[in-house]
């Protein structure tokens, strides 16, 4: 829920970005929100433990981790939305050939490892 899957290859990431720029942005925002949620969950639990040790614990502190969980849920939802936007264009990544493929305007578009190397040479 908190940590979203990352790219296995740079070609997959760039292909996803070219397929759906909005989905790519949503994927990045979702990953950031998930990370913030994980940090806030740990911080709120540590703070509640500190207050328990200090003898000033109150049951209202148990609501603090809900914010971290909420960030995790929203981040996961944004990532799922990004993946669904790419799926609408039939995006797929072939790990063996290191090629991203999708359909755009009825035509098949691709981005391969050779394309990536050619861009790096420029």
Image: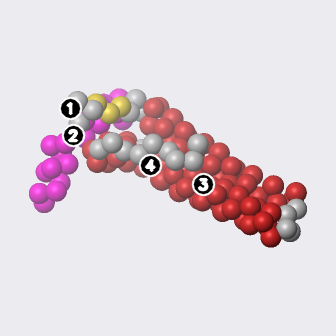
Residue 50, percent across and down? 74, 66
**Image: magenta residue range:** 99-122
**Pair 1/4: label in front:** 1
Evaluate if marks 1 and 4 touch, with contact meaning CB atoms under 8 Å apart. no
Residue 116, percent across and down? 20, 48
Q: Secondary structure at mark 4?
A: helix
Q: Write down the residue under mark 3.
A: 38
Q: Write down the residue under mark 1.
A: 97
Evaluate if marks 1 and 2 touch, with contact meaning CB atoms under 8 Å apart. yes
Residue located at (80% from left, 63% from top): 52
Evaluate if marks 2 and 4 touch, with contact meaning CB atoms under 8 Å apart. no
Nearest the eye: 38 or 7? 38
CA gap, disc 3 and disc 1: 35 Å
Instruction: Quarter of the image for the N terminus: give it.
Output: top right
Residue located at (85% from left, 68% from top): 55
Task: Classify residue 92 by image quadrant.
Answer: top left
Chain-order first, disc 3 or disc 1: 3
CA gap, disc 1 and disc 4: 22 Å
Crowd tier of the residue under label 1, counting other residues whose Cα lies within 10 Å: few below 14, some 14–19, many 20 or above: few
Image vertical order of residue 30 relative to residue 101, above or below: below
Q: Write down the residue under mark 2.
A: 112
Nearest the eye: 4 or 58? 58
Chain-order first, disc 1 or disc 2: 1
CA gap, disc 2 and disc 4: 18 Å
Q: Secondary structure at mark 1?
A: loop
Residue located at (25% from left, 40% from top): 111
């Amino acid at each position: 829920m908190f940590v979203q899957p990352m790219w296995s290859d740079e070609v997959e990431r760039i292909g996803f970005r070219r397929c759906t720029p909005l989905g790519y942005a949503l994927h990045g925002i979702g990953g950031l929100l998930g990370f913030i949620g994980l940090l806030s969950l740990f911080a709120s639990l540590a703070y509640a433990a500190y207050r328990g040790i200090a003898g000033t614990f109150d049951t209202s502190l148990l609501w603090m981790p809900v914010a971290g969980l909420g960030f995790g849920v929203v981040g996961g939802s944004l990532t799922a939305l990004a993946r669904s936007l790419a799926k609408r264009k039939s995006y797929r990544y072939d790990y063996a050939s290191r090629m991203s493929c999708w359909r755009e305007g009825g035509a098949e578009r691709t981005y391969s490892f050779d394309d990536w190397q050619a861009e790096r040479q420029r």
